[in-house]
């Protein structure tokens, strides 16, 4: 089944590319340039193919990162009229960095939301439990951190549902939010998230703390220059996912105290996502209307 779906998808891409190439070729060859020289014809064909590919990739990029049309199910930020900001940490829990981050949050008495990876929750259940016990909110960041749009539907469901089951079983908290790895989503992801009562939450400020060789200073500067009311700030509390990206989150830990102080010095309040997005704490379990 999975293979058939992948084949059908590749087929659809090829048909789409052929159609786009034909349209450009028609415009260039028949309407605009009207050359009958063989070399020119060949050149125009390759230009058409490149334009077709360009349109496909741009379309794919926009669809995967921004979707199409009005998307009331996707949260990118809170109200710009508020003075509230939310901190979010992705990819954990990790044994190296999450406890240090939790210590700092406790010291400053500041809430955060942790978007956890299912396999990491299985690996470090005590740390996941500590996150919940210390009152932080919990989001679903899929089970294995794979790129959502490239998955078959069965794999996609597995990624979201397995993580949901693991996080709920270990922490006792149903994740109210889901964040797709690298911010890449599609229609299937949105439908499933809505069905299981998880709001899709992206971010407005990426501290880019996943980069190799990132310094605490660059993280602090990013927040200092950009932060304003309604922002959702993205950090990472685990480095175990992206190969060749260093995997070291010490800069995040070192930057965090100053980041918190800078936000507060600007008169902004750090609140849980539920407060930023809905003005009230989310329910532990989503309410589902069951027809009789
Ligand atoms: Zn991630």
Image (spheres, rainbow, N blue to C red):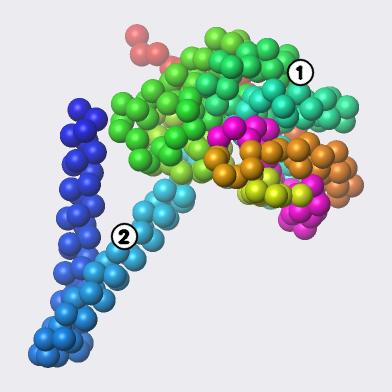
- Most foreground residue, 164 or 47: 47
Q: Tell me the SS state at disc 1.
A: loop
Residue at 36% from the left image edge and 13% from the top image edge:
291
The x and y percentages for residue 24 are: 22, 74
226 shown above or below 169: below
**Which sits earlier in the primary sequence, circle 2 or circle 1?**
2
Identify the residue at image location x=23%, y=74%.
Answer: 46
Residue 105 in the figure: left or right of residue 24 = right
Q: How far separated are the C-alphas under marks 2 and 1?
A: 46 Å
- If the image is split into quadrants, where does the N terminus sit? top left
Most foreground residue, 108 or 209: 209
Viewer can see residue 227 = no
- Residue at position x 73%, y 29% in the image: 97
Assign a secondary structure to mark 2: helix
Whether residue 148 is visible, yes or no, is: yes
Counting from the top left corner in percent of width and height, residue 5 is at 22, 35
Magenta-tinted stretch: 216-241
Identify the disc placed on residue 134.
Answer: 1
Above-or-below relation of 118 to 57: above
Percent coordinates x, y for residue 52 in the rendering: 27, 66
Kindly indicate the quadrant of the structure image that contains residue 264.
top right
Is 172 drawn above or below residue 234 in the view shown? above
Q: To which quarter of the image does residue 48 belong?
A: bottom left
Assess disc 2: are there few (<14), some (14-19) or many (≥20) residues with their C-alpha within 10 Å of its C-alpha.
Answer: some
- Left or right of 292? Residue 250 is right
Say whether residue 49 is magenta. no
The residue nearer to you, when weighing 145 against 282, is 145
For label 2, the residue is 56
Mark 1 closeness class: few <14, some 14–19, many ≥20 residues within 10 Å:
few
Of the 4 image quadrants, the one containing the C terminus is: top left
For ligand 1, tell me if the residue under mark 1 lies within 8 Å.
no
Mark 2 touching mark 1, by CB under 8 A?
no
């Amino acid at each position: 089944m999975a293979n058939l779906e992948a084949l059908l998808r590749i087929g659809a891409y090829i048909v789409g590319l052929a159609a786009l190439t034909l349209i450009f070729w028609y415009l260039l060859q028949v309407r605009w340039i009207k050359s009958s020289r063989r070399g020119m014809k060949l050149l125009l064909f390759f230009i058409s193919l490149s334009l077709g590919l360009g349109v496909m990739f741009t379309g794919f990029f926009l669809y995967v990162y921004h979707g199409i049309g009005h998307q009331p199910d996707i949260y990118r930020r809170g109200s710009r009229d508020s003075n509230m900001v939310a901190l979010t940490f992705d990819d954990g829990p990790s044994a190296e960095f999450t406890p240090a981050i939790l210590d700092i949050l406790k010291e400053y008495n500041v809430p955060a939301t942790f978007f956890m990876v299912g396999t990491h929750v299985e690996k470090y259940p005590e740390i996941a439990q500590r996150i919940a016990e210390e009152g932080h909110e919990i989001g679903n960041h899929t089970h294995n951190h794979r790129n959502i749009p490239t998955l078959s539907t069965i794999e996609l469901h597995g990624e979201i549902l397995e993580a949901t089951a693991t996080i709920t079983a270990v922490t006792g908290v149903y994740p109210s939010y889901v964040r797709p790895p690298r911010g890449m989503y599609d229609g299937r992801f949105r439908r499933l998230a809505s069905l299981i009562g998880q709001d899709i939450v992206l971010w407005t400020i990426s501290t880019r703390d996943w980069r190799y060789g990132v310094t605490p200073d660059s993280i602090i500067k990013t927040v200092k220059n950009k932060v304003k009311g309604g922002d959702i700030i993205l950090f990472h509390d685990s480095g175990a996912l992206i190969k060749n990206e260093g995997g070291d989150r010490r800069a995040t830990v070192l930057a965090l105290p100053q980041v918190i102080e800078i936000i507060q010095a600007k008169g902004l309040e750090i609140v849980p996502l539920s407060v930023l997005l809905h003005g009230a704490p989310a329910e532990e379990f989503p309410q589902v209307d069951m027809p009789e």
